[in-house]
Image (tube, rainbow, N blue to C red):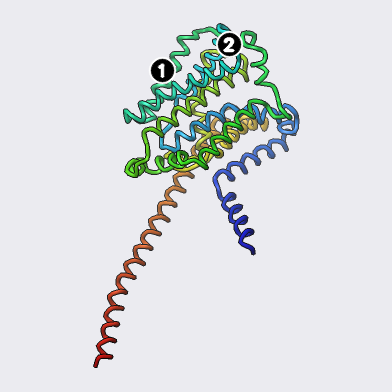
Amino acid sequence: MTALAASVLGGLKGALRSREAAVAAVLVLVVVGTSLVQPGFLVSRSGWRDLLLTPAILVVLAVGQAMVVFTRNIDLSVGSVLGLTAYLTGRLFADGGLPIPVVVLVTVLAGAVLGLVNGAVVAFARVPALVVTLGTMYAYRGVVLTWAGSDRIDADEMPRAFGALGTRQVATIPVLAIVAVVVLAVAAWFMHTSRAGRQLYAIGSDPDAAHLHGLPVARRVLWVFVVSGALAGLGGAMFAARYGTVSSGAGSGLELQVVGAVVVGGVAIFGGSGTVVGAAIGAVLLLTINRALPVVGVPDFWQRAVVGVLILSAIVLDRVLAVRRTRRLVAARLDEHARFVAAAADQPAAGVEHARAGEGRAS
């Protein structure tokens, strides 16, 4: 076997062992199994469209959430940020008549500012992210409830071209799905190639050690919350385009789906490992299961139970794998220490034998 072939086979084996490949395999099984029961689930035009379009918003939010979780933090405010920015999108169109690119840019910037608030408190005030984002989740939701009240923005108050983004396709692929793929590709490239991306893993693995090694921990934590907020803002604009109707309840409860997608996709909830690609696959898997279970006749209660069991199983699996990695690391260090001690013990013995041999030659 040539070196090239060995390298390729090694890469394939590594891919097959990865959590992302396992989640992708489950996704394929769900789609194939459901298609056998109901062929229109995938092969019909609407089935293919829904399979790609439905997870698009969740994928965008999961990418931002994954980057936060890499640093051993969590952002529970993404659903409220999406709801607030979705309503902002509608209001800008209804009241301001601004161009579509300007509205989307303002929405993304608004989400980034809301994320900046989260990140500043977490990074510099050292308040746990769970507490901070739980508070801002209710605060941001309160803002949109007060602002919108019982008001609702309908599709006829927004430009027809903007609403078309939620239904338009390019080569049978929905535009919003293309947006999600572009966001995912940029994030994956950044995490894989940039020094800052690698630092996120180091911070999540051991924040104290990262700080001692001079990594800009606070700045990186602040930055990932800004990114998460900006992507939630983009998700708000996508929500308005996708559904056409925006009310104060937009995005309610979405934060739990986002966290579930990230965990199911193989991102360690305690930080330091995982990929944005895995988080995106987890998002697609969760929403595909939600679509598939009614097709096979599973009641609504059991649909939620199945998703809950899937999330719990992913967390348990993550902890089991983490414990195994720790044990292997400890065993390797103990073995290395034992070899070092044995080598140190052999050196004096070798010195004594050498001295005795010298005395024999002298006599």
Dot 1, crowdedness within 10 Å: few (<14), some or many (≥20)?
some
Q: Which mark is residue 224?
A: none
Q: CA distance from mark 2 to mark 1?
A: 27 Å
Q: Measuring from the top left, give residue 310's x and y in whole percent.
A: 53, 38
Sooner in the amino-acid sequence: mark 2 or mark 1 = 2
Q: Residue at x 49, y 38 (%)?
A: 312
Identify the image quadrant of residue 203.
Answer: top left
The residue identified by callout 1 is 139
Three-letter residue code for mark 1: Ala
Q: Secondary structure at mark 2?
A: loop
- Residue 273 higher or lower than 340, as above or below: above
Three-letter residue code for mark 2: Leu
Q: Measuring from the top left, give residue 337's x and y in whole percent.
A: 34, 63
Q: Residue at x 67, y 15 (%)?
A: 161
Foreground pick, 254 / 5? 5
Dot 2, crowdedness within 10 Å: few (<14), some or many (≥20)?
few
Q: Which mark is residue 98?
A: 2
- Residue 248 higher or lower than 287, as above or below: above
Q: Measuring from the top left, give residue 186's x and y in whole percent.
A: 56, 34
Q: Measuring from the top left, give residue 53's x and y in whole percent.
A: 65, 27
